Amino acid sequence: MRLDALSVFDEGREKLESVSEAAKRFWVRDGGSGYPYGQAGQRLEEALVAELVARGVDPAWIKRGRNATLPMVQGVDRSWDLVISKDSVPLAAIVWKASSAASFRKNMRNHMQELSAIAVDVRMRHGHPDLYRIRPHLGFIFIEEERQERIALPGRGRQHARVEVRSSTLSRVSDHFYERLIETRLYDNACYIVSNGDSESAPSQPHRSMELASFIEQLAKDVLVLAERHERDGITLNAYFELLSKKNDISHLRTQRDEAAFEELLSSRLTEDALFELKQGFCTVNDPTKFDDRNFDKILKIASAMANTGTGADGVILVGVADDAQDAAAIKRFSSVNSIEVGGFHVTGTRHEMDGLGRSIDEHFRWLVSKIRSAKLTPRFAEEVASSLTPFTYKGYLLWRIDIRAMNTPVTYDGKFYVRSGPGVREVSGDAVVDLVRKFDTREA
C-alpha cells in the first residue's frame, strides 16, 4: 500500500510538471517572430484539465472556449476561459491572463480592471445569504513575461546592457493587486507565474500563496466539495436560478416561512444539547470592539465534537442568540441592544459587533471563512465548516448559522479528538479513540 501511494504521488508530480512546462514555454517565440498566444493558451488549458481529471474531477463537467459560460439571471457571462459545472450548475470558473514584456505597461491596468469586473459581476449576483454555501469557486492564472530593459552604462561610447528587471513600480503595484483580489475574497484562488522566452529556464513564482501546485490542489478540492454539496442538498438548475433571482442584498429579510422555521428550531430545544449550540456573539460581551479568540476556538472545538457524534449526525451552531437572560442583560448594558425572547432563548444579534469591529457583514463573512479555513481542524472538515457558515436576519437581528455534518471518520481539533457530553465537550484518548472510530462508516474514507 505504501508503494502504491508513492507511485500515485510520483505520477501526480509528473503531471504537475506538464502544467509547469506549458507555463515555461508560454513565451517561447514561434520561429523567432511573434508570440504563439493561442497555441500557448491551449496547451496551458489542456494541461490544467488533465491535472483536474487526475484529481477526481469528472471531465464531462469541464467546459472550454465558447462552452465556458456561467448561468446568470441577466443573460450569460462569457468572460471565462474554463468553467466547471455539474448538471449545468456552476462549480468553478477560471480566467487566465498574460502580459508580454512589450505590452506590460500598456495593458496591465486593463487586465486589472477586467479581472476585477468579471469577478464583481459574479459575486454581486451571488450576494444573497442562501447562495454563500454554493457560489462557484473563482480563480485566475496570470502569466507574465520576464521583462528586459536597456540600462545605459555610465561613460560616453559605452554599449547598452540588456538586464532582466522585475522591480519596477508597476510590477509592485500588480503584485499587490493580485494579493488584494484574494484577501478580499473576490477570487478564491490565484496562480501567478513569471516566465520568459528561454525554454530551458524554469518559471518563477513570486508569491508562495499563489503557486501552481496549491492553485490546482485548492481548485480540485473546492470543485469536489461543491459537487457533493449540490447532490446532498438537491441543488438543480431550476433551484439555482430561483436563488439567483432573489434580492442581492446581504441584509435581505428572511421570508415569514424562514422566520417560522427559525422559531421552531429554538422552540423545539429546551436547552443546549449534543447537536445544538448557542453563542451570544463573536466578540466579548463587555466589549463589542474586541473579537473573542478563545470563544471562537471553543466554537470550532464544539463543531469537531458534534461531528464526532457518529455517522449521519447533523448539528447546528447559532451565533447571535444568548442561552440565558444574564448574557442578554450584559449585552444590553454594554451595547444598548434589546433582545427578544424566542423559545426561552434570547436573540441579541451581532450587528453591534459589526459596528464595533468597523466591518460590513460581507467583510466579516470573508474574514471568518478565512479564519475557519486556517484553523486547527482536520483540513477537509475545516472546509466544510467554512462553507456552511451563513449570515441571516431574523426580525432585523443579524445572526450566523453553522451546520455541522459528520464525516466518514472522526475529526480533530488541534490534533485531539473531542466529543459532546451533554452541552459540554470532553477530550477522548487511548482506548476511547478506538470506540470513537467504531461509530463511523469508514468504507468510503
Image (cartoon, grey):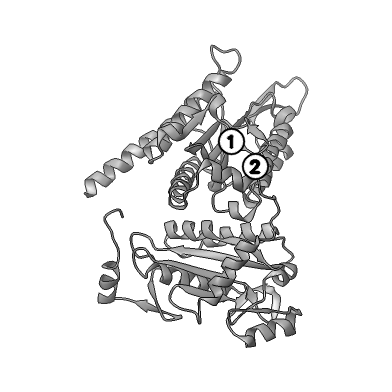
Q: Which mark is residue 96?
A: none
Residue located 60% across and 48% down the image: 243
Which of the 4 image quadrants contains residue 140? Answer: top right
Residue 343 in view (yes/no):
yes
Q: Which of 320 and 378 lies nearest the eye of the viewer?
A: 320
Where disc 2 sits, the SS reads helix
Left or right placement of residue 299 versus residue 356 in this view? left
Near mark 1 (Cα within 10 A), the count class, few <14, some 14-19 or many ≥20, is: many
Residue closest to the far bottom: 326
Which amino acid type is marked by label 1?
Answer: Leu
Which of the 4 image quadrants contains residue 78? Answer: top right
Q: Which of 381 and 45 lies nearest the eye of the viewer?
A: 381
Which amino acid type is marked by label 2?
Answer: Val
Instruction: Using the numbered discs, state the Cα–Cα distance from disc 1 to disc 2 in whole angstroms.
Output: 9 Å
Residue 354 position within the rendered picture, expressed as x and y whole percent measured from the top left: 71, 67
Point out the image quarter for the C terminus: bottom left
165 up-or-down from 370: above or below: above
Residue 217 position within the rendered picture, expressed as x and y whole percent measured from the top left: 45, 45
Residue located beneath label 2 in the image: 122
Q: Which of 16 and 240 lies nearest the eye of the viewer?
A: 240
For marks 1 and 2, the one nearer the N-term is 1
Residue located 63% across and 38% down the image: 72
Residue located 58% across and 79% down the image: 343
Residue 26 in view (yes/no):
no
**How many dots with numbers?**
2
Are the residues at dot 1 and dot 2 in contact (C-beta closer than 8 Å)? yes
38 up-or-down from 15: above or below: above
Q: Which mark is residue 70?
A: 1
